[in-house]
Image (tube, rainbow, N blue to C red):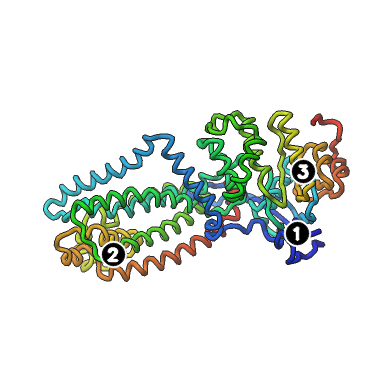
């Protein structure tokens, strides 16, 4: 088995600039005001995942989960330390970010597929599967702006779960969609897991984490507070497996 | 750290930094995405409103009419032969460059949803923006060709060289400027105001509306430095080269026009300007890569 993701002494600081324009920068600089504040979102985090591991990333709001996920996906760069990954990264993070409301559902499948890294040939090959999964055949030629939020999520989701990848990232997904669709998604995600993909799953839902993940990480104020099995991680965070109703 | 060292034989390839993507090379590798982004841009701008499509031609047409009639009145008998063609050959260059400046500068911020959330070569956005601007040049070139045909255009081989060089110059400079300013615009959102001012300056410091001889006569002897500066901007070079390509082959006293309406060493200057542009593009790309690291959190 080979190493899939390495997070090595990663620290991420956010600089909050007090000015968004050149004008304000000049004004603040001449008046001797402080030009930026910074806070540490992630503080010296290290862990390693093997190919096929599935891990739940837990923590309270603002603990740095999403930041960590963005570093692994490559959207952000760490200030110190390094993130390494092997193979193609995709996932259910921010599904729908690439949707163009003025284009039809059909065009959006191509555009979004390409944004998520699919080749033209790959999209053509998977087009029918994506449409079938979304059950949106009838609305395919309508502009996406006319979709309901549920329909939008269905389409975005279907595209995202059909990208070929070795590392699959998920951030608070399954918040939208009706029960049958949610169930279908969970089934699909389980299959991806069985196929040996590395999975990183950010969630507040202890049941989902225990269900899907072998391991759990708990972040607290940007630091790695706990690492162990997913059940232990849920307990370490003080969450209960019973107090949230879900499928 | 206890991570096992990556074996080179791993079927998934080596362990790499997931944020490494970027650079113009990666944009080229993902040209299918680039094509779709350009198509989306064109479709959103045009297909959904035929009036929007018309507007993008009404505006330059009105500008052209103003330059032609009003400046023509002021110039009186000193006006150039085939002046419409002269204005138009300059306008192709200037319109492209201002388009590249204004939409290129906004390109990254406009796509912030993608930049913040999905790992992509971010150069994709300025490159897509420039591609759209290039696309807009096509009808202008067609109109210019039509103008050439009715005025009697007799090009030599150098006319084509000049046209190609003019296009090359504004392409590398336009892309360089778009990369540089789009990255800076993430940090300073009022940059577009400065760009507006820059656009006005550019329009009037190129020999498009007025003949080049007016500048040459007044500045070359009296203020040689200002003259040098004037003919050393990328846009002036592109406009003058395009005049050489489109306008000059249409006039009757070509030899005379070559001396009065164009600077000396036109091609040498153009070649240098192109090479400097390539260097500038490289520099802009470097700056873009540096600034790009914090795009996601700044947007």
Residue B285: numbered disc: none
**Contact between labelled residues 2 and 1, with CB atoms less than 8 Å apart:** no
The residue that label 3 is drawn on is A191
In this orientation, does residue B187 appear? no
Q: CA distance from mark 3 to mark 1?
A: 29 Å
**Contact between labelled residues 1 and 3, with CB atoms less than 8 Å apart:** no
The residue that label 2 is drawn on is B226
| Left-right relation of B184 to B149 | right
Q: CA distance from mark 2 to mark 3?
A: 70 Å
Mark 1 vs mark 2: in front: 1
Q: Earlier in the sequence, mark 3 or mark 1?
A: 1
In the structure shown, which secondary structural element does the residue marked by tag 2 occupy? helix
Q: CA distance from mark 1 to mark 2?
A: 56 Å
- The correct choice, above or below, for A109 with respect to B168 in the image is above
Identified at 70% across, 45% down, the residue is: A66
The residue that label 1 is drawn on is A8
Residue A240 percent across, percent down from the top left: 86, 35
Badge 3 density bin: few <14, some 14–19, many ≥20, Cα 10 Å: few
């Amino acid at each position: 088995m080979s190493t899939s993701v390495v997070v090595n002494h990663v620290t991420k600081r956010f600089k909050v600039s007090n000015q968004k324009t050149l004008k304000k920068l000049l004004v603040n600089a001449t008046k001797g005001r402080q030009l930026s504040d910074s806070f540490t979102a992630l503080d010296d985090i290290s862990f390693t995942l093997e190919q096929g591991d599935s891990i739940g990333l837990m923590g309270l709001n603002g603990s740095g989960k999403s930041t960590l996920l963005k570093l692994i996906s490559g959207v952000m760069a760490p200030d110190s330390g390094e993130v390494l990954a092997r193979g193609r990264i995709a996932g259910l993070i921010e599904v729908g970010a690439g949707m163009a409301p003025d284009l039809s559902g059909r065009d959006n499948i191509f555009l979004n597929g390409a944004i998520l890294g699919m080749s033209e040939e790959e999209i053509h090959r998977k087009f029918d599967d994506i449409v079938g999964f979304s059950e949106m055949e009838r609305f395919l030629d309508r502009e996406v702006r006319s979709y309901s939020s549920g329909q939008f999520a269905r389409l975005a989701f279907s595209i995202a779960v059909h990208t070929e990848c070795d590392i699959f990232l998920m951030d608070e997904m399954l918040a939208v969609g009706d029960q049958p669709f949610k169930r279908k998604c969970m089934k699909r995600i389980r299959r991806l897991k069985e196929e040996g993909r590395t999975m990183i799953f950010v969630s507040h839902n202890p049941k989902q984490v225990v269900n899907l993940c072998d391991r759990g990480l708990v972040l607290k104020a940007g630091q790695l507070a706990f690492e162990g099995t997913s059940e232990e991680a849920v307990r370490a965070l003080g969450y209960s497996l019973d107090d949230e109703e879900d499928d | 750290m206890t991570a096992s060292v990556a074996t080179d034989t791993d079927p998934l390839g080596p362990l790499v930094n997931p944020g490494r993507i970027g650079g113009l090379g990666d944009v080229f590798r993902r040209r299918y995405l680039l094509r779709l982004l350009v198509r989306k841009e064109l479709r959103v701008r045009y297909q959904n409103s035929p009036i929007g499509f018309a507007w993008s031609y009404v505006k330059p047409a009105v500008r052209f009419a103003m330059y032609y009639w009003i400046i023509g009145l002021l110039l009186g008998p000193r006006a150039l032969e085939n002046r419409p063609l002269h204005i138009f050959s300059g306008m192709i260059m200037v319109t492209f460059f201002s388009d590249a400046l204004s939409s290129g500068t906004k390109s990254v911020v406009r796509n912030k949803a993608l930049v913040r959330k999905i790992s992509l070569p971010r150069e994709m956005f300025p490159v897509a923006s420039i591609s759209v601007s290039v696309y807009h040049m096509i009808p202008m070139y067609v109109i210019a060709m039509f103008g050439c045909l009715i005025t009697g255009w007799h090009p030599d081989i150098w006319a084509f060289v000049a046209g190609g060089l003019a296009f090359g110059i504004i392409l590398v400079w336009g892309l360089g400027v778009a990369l540089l300013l789009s990255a800076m615009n993430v940090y300073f959102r009022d940059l577009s105001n400065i760009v507006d001012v820059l656009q006005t300056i550019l329009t009037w410091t190129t020999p498009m509306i007025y003949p080049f001889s007016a500048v040459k006569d007044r500045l070359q002897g009296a203020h040689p430095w200002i003259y040098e500066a004037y003919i050393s901007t990328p846009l002036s070079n592109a406009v003058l080269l395009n005049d050489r390509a489109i306008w000059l082959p249409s006039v009757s006293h070509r030899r005379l026009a070559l001396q009065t309406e164009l600077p000396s060493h036109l091609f040498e200057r153009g070649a240098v300007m192109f090479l400097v542009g390539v260097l500038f593009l490289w520099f802009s790309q470097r700056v873009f890569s540096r600034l790009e690291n914090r795009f996601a959190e700044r947007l």
